[in-house]
Image (cartoon, helix red, strand yellow):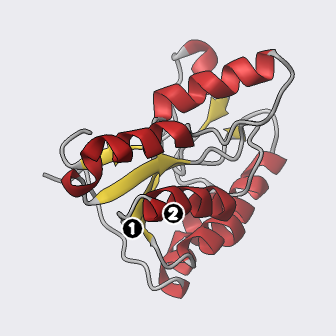
Amino acid sequence: LVHGILLAGIGVGVTDMMLDSARGEHRSTYINLAFVAGTLAAGAGPYFDVLGYHWFPNLLQPMTGPQKQRHLEDVVASAGYPKPLWLTETYRLTFSDNPDSAVSQIRFLNREIVEMLAQPELAGVYWYGWQDFPPGYGNLTRAQRGLVRGDHTPKPGFRVLPYVIAYTAGESSNASAG
């Protein structure tokens, strides 16, 4: 529980997925649902307003974004605490040596993010890594998460944001503005 937001066992879920993968298993939901259920059973339900979770489609995950969200909704609702969900981190990687990855980022925004925004309990989506790492960050500069390059020029995916926002009744906001 952090500042009124129940974090969905992210660290525990990632560890479980890594262990599952090392054993050749793919049973993990990438979020430890037992941790969420246990936290609620321990009495945390009245002390948070939203449930934040991450969805990284570039990583091996056994379910789609809407499937993951439904699993979380079910756990929270079955504990008697239905809460709105925030997708607090997502992105689609691009690679400087693979021009098709920019197309993949556009598809992700136009299809998968739109599908997520159509989920009634999803209160918000937060893109992880607005801007790419600038040159000089070593191996971090090959796989980039941003919608804007390190030199501040927009990527093709950036240009579809007005469409996504307009056609999903979303509101853009700058959470980093003071």
Q: Residue furthest right?
A: 24
* Cβ–Cβ under 8 Å for marks 1 and 2: yes
- Across and down, in percent, residue 157 comes to 62, 60
Q: Is residue 91 above or below residue 116?
A: above
Task: Name the residue: 73% across, 51% down.
Answer: 102
Identify which residue, 127 or 36, lies in the foreground: 36
What label sits on residue 35 in the rendered view? none
Q: Secondary structure at mark 1?
A: loop
Task: Name the residue: 72% across, 57% down.
Answer: 64
Q: Is residue 25 visible?
A: yes
- Across and down, in percent, residue 167 comes to 55, 86
Q: Horizontally, is 124 left or right of 111 in the view?
A: left
Rendered-image quadrant of the N terminus: top left
Q: Earlier in the sequence, mark 1 or mark 2?
A: 2
The residue indicated by pointer 2 is: 73
Q: Horizontally, is 5 left or right of 71 in the view?
A: left
Q: Secondary structure at mark 2?
A: helix
Q: Amino acid at mark 2?
A: Glu
Q: Residue furthest left?
A: 178
Q: Is residue 125 visible?
A: no
The residue indicated by pointer 1 is: 82
Q: Quadrant of residue 177?
A: bottom left
Identify which residue, 160 or 53, lies in the foreground: 53
